Image: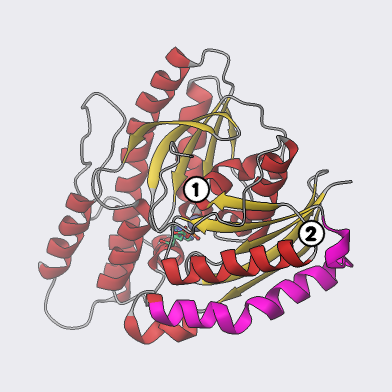
Amino acid sequence: MTVVLGIETSCDETAAAVVDHDRRILGEVVRGQLDAHRDYGGVVPEIAARAHLDVVDVVIRRAMSDAGCEFCDLDGVAATAGPGLIGGVIVGTMTGKAIAVSHDLPFLAINHLEAHVLTPRLTGEVAFPYLALLVSGGHSQFVAAVDVGRYHVLGTTIDDAMGEAFDKTGKMLGLGFPGGPAVERAAIAGDPRRFALPRPLAGRPGCDFSFSGLKTAVRHAIEALPPGPLAESDIADLCASFQQAVGDVMAERGANAIEAFQSRFPDGETLVVAGGVAANAALRERLETVAEKHELTFVAPPPRLCTDNGAMIAWAGLERLGRGLTDGLDFAPRPRWPLEARP
Ligand code: KG4
Ligand code: ZN
């Protein structure tokens, strides 16, 4: 049995998990930092780094004890080495390396984006090649996953990440941070037809997408409402209209992405959605419909494994360890690390 510890510290969750190669999550802890950042309306990198430093040991110890594991029971230690807020990434990487060196274990430097893209293989049987829509707070792309470590980006946002668009919309509507889950909750009671928001790049060839015009349109719609505090129904209708526009855009761009994927990888059978925004039920539903139309199986991990967590890092570590793709202790943490580039 191969068992790997995964450590995630690239944004505002300090997370650790112990996972085995039978896809069992033996122990898992996610500690958020929302209270530390709430007054600032977003994640403050210095505060995040210090908060990771304060709790990373405890989080790892709890995940290990929940798993009933000692460090000597592990076969490897995986840590997010980028991309992300560099202070946090340094904390996680240094901690992972320290555990690896002191217990003579292989170290696995994990690309956070790769971990999101590989998560559907932790939660089910998904064979390569597959098409992934990776949508998080910092990244949004259609990726052909050909094998572990082999990815082709087919399309990407040309401006804001999808999570960023949700967060900014939430912020404009006074829904706090992060906006994504709050926008989804508010949209349930809203009328998606009340506000006519744009569908950026609709009808254009290719599968790049764009959200900045949509965000601006939400701001204009808010400004056109009567002055004073927004009514609950206005907030709900705006959230529903925004979510509908995002769904329409991704259904249309998703169809193009699937066609591009199928022409290059005719044996591919699956569309997966991954990353924090993949927790959004409305988006999942839209993508499922597009996948079915193109005879692809649609796979979405459970929401708690879509947002940042340690299990996805441990799993990416297991996938890489199984292929002998270990890293040296001189591996430098990276604030930027495109999926296609791996020295
Ligand atoms: O992957 P993730 O946890 O962290 C990054 O790697 O960025 O993604 C966080 C993003 C945030 O922008 C958050 O608002 C968004 O995912 N998000 C959602 C939902 N849950 C999280 N967006 C829309 N609907 C949700 N239910
Ligand atoms: Zn993430």
Residues at marks 1 and 2 touching, judged by CB atoms closer than 8 Å: no
Asked whether 71 falls inside the magenta stretch, the response is yes
Q: Which residue is labeled 1 in the image?
A: 113
Q: Nearer the viewer, residue 32 or 177?
A: 32
Q: Amino acid at mark 1?
A: Leu
In which quadrant of the rendered view does residue 307 lie?
A: bottom right
Residue 312 can be seen, yes or no: no
Q: Main secondary structure of the magenta part?
A: helix
Please tell me whether residue 334 belongs to the stretch shown in magenta. no
- Alpha carbon separation for disc pair 1 and 2: 27 Å
Left or right? Give the position of 178 relative to 239.
right
Query: Is ligand 2 closer than 8 angstroms to the Cβ of mark 1?
Result: yes
In this orientation, which residue lies closer to the viewer: 114 or 229? 114
**Image location (x, y in percent) of residue 245:** 29, 46
Q: Which residues are magenta?
A: 46-74
Local crowd size for mark 2, using a 10 Å CA cut-off: few (<14), some (14–19), many (≥20): few
